[in-house]
Amino acid sequence: MLPSYPESTMRALARNILTNTLRMKRGENLFIDTWSATLPWAQSFVLEARILGARPMLTLEDEETYWKSVKEAPAAHVAQVGSHDWAALKASHAYMYFYGPLDVERMDSLPNSVKNRLYANDNEWFRLVEKLGIRVARWDLGRTSEAVARRYGISLAQWRGELVEAGSLDPRPLQKDGQRIAEAMRRGRELRITHPNGTDLTLRLARRTPRVDDGVIDPADVRSGNIFSVIPSGVTSTSVDEGFAEGTVVSNMVGAMFVHGEELMLAGAEWTFRRGRLEKYTHTSGGDAFRSAFSKLGPGKDRPGLVSVGLNPAIHSIPLLFDQERGIISVTVGRNSQVGGRTRTPHFTAYSSIRGGSLAIDGRPYVEAGELV
């Protein structure tokens, strides 16, 4: 179960996301999708939306009933989406999703064949929201649990506190820093990352359009298809020249890799690149899984993917948002087509992130010792 929160806290978060992230306007339709654990938060969104003059519709998935359904009904039946549900989505201007179910461990333990059927409609859902330009925000309090916190070696209370604090932070000030770094990435030719821990990596920029996830879905984002925001947000990223990478990056943070949709934790990565390829790698945690996956994958797995800079001062320990902590520098290998790169396969991306590092573009510093310049 989730702890109880003051109504003022829940309403402040709702106001921030509705006003600054989803940018709800009077007369717009808002689809709110929640699980039973996060219902009190969703109710605050209903109230604040009505105060703004928007028209909210709330749908609820009861977790106890859901798990009974998974146990007793065919998975394909559990995943069915009715025409009335699709119709409501098509008529919405914005969509607010509260992550669920709360029992993440139970979901992870299901066979992949069952999970694939439960998530069978995800591709169609994403296709529709992108086609129609529906602004989407997701908030992950429903993902938190003691088991998942132990997996990442973090405090559950701190994780939940950061989700609330960072989710309530006005994201608009992040735009200025994010756009400034993005413009340098777009115009620059060479990027160098350094740290006293032995990191010294040079990458080439490919003059591609960077992506700024600042927690604000404005008209420019809608036009470019950047309509999905995980709250809290705060990162500027760009794909790099896949044919060039020289040097070493030494991570001092917990990171992750994603293989065919499966999420695995990494820590203490030390990667050495030569002639544009990941030539040598070690990890203090997750190394066996990385080695096993890496050995089976095809071309593209060892190419540099993207580089990013975190922008959010209220993020310090949130799993899977580690790259969005202010001043964090991240480098990936593998697939980068999701940010305009050329590596589409294999479906593998691994992150190596540094706290306290420095980043310069064409010799000009943009991060120094973990601080944005």
Image (tube, rainbow, N blue to C red):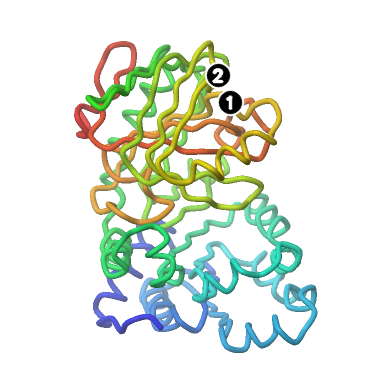
Q: Is residue 53 above or below residue 131?
A: below
Which residue bears the numbered disc 1?
302
Residue 29 x %, y %: 54, 69
Query: Horizontal placement of 114 versus 168: left or right?
Result: right
Q: Amino acid at mark 2?
A: Arg
Is 372 in front, or is 179?
372
Q: Is residue 55 left or right of residue 355?
A: right
Rendered view: 56 above or below 125: below
Name the image quarter holding residue 176: top left
Identify the residue at image location x=29%, y=47%.
312
Provide the secondary structure element on which disc 1 rests.
loop
- Disc 2 + disc 1, Cβ < 8 Å: yes
In the rendered view of the protein, which quadrant contains the C terminus?
top left
Q: Nearer the viewer, residue 177 or 370?
A: 370
Residue 66 coordinates in the image, percent (x, y)? 63, 83
Amino acid type at image mark 1 = Asp
Residue at point 57% right, 24% down? 303
167 left or right of 124 in image: left
Which numbered disc covers residue 16?
none
Question: Is 334 above or below relative to 286?
Answer: above
Q: Residues within 10 Å of mark 2 (few under 14, many from 20)?
A: some
Upstream in sequence: badge 2 or badge 1: 2
Location of residue 136 in the rendering, given as x and y in whole percent from the top left corner: 52, 58
Q: Label 2 vs label 1: CA separation?
A: 5 Å
Q: In the figure, residue 57 lies in which quadrant? A: bottom right
Q: Which residue was labeled with disc 2?
A: 277
**Location of residue 69 in the rendering, given as x and y in whole percent from the top left corner:** 70, 85
Question: What residue appears at the point 37 percent right and 46 percent down from the top-left corner?
Answer: 254
Task: Say which quarter of the image contains residue 48.
Answer: bottom left
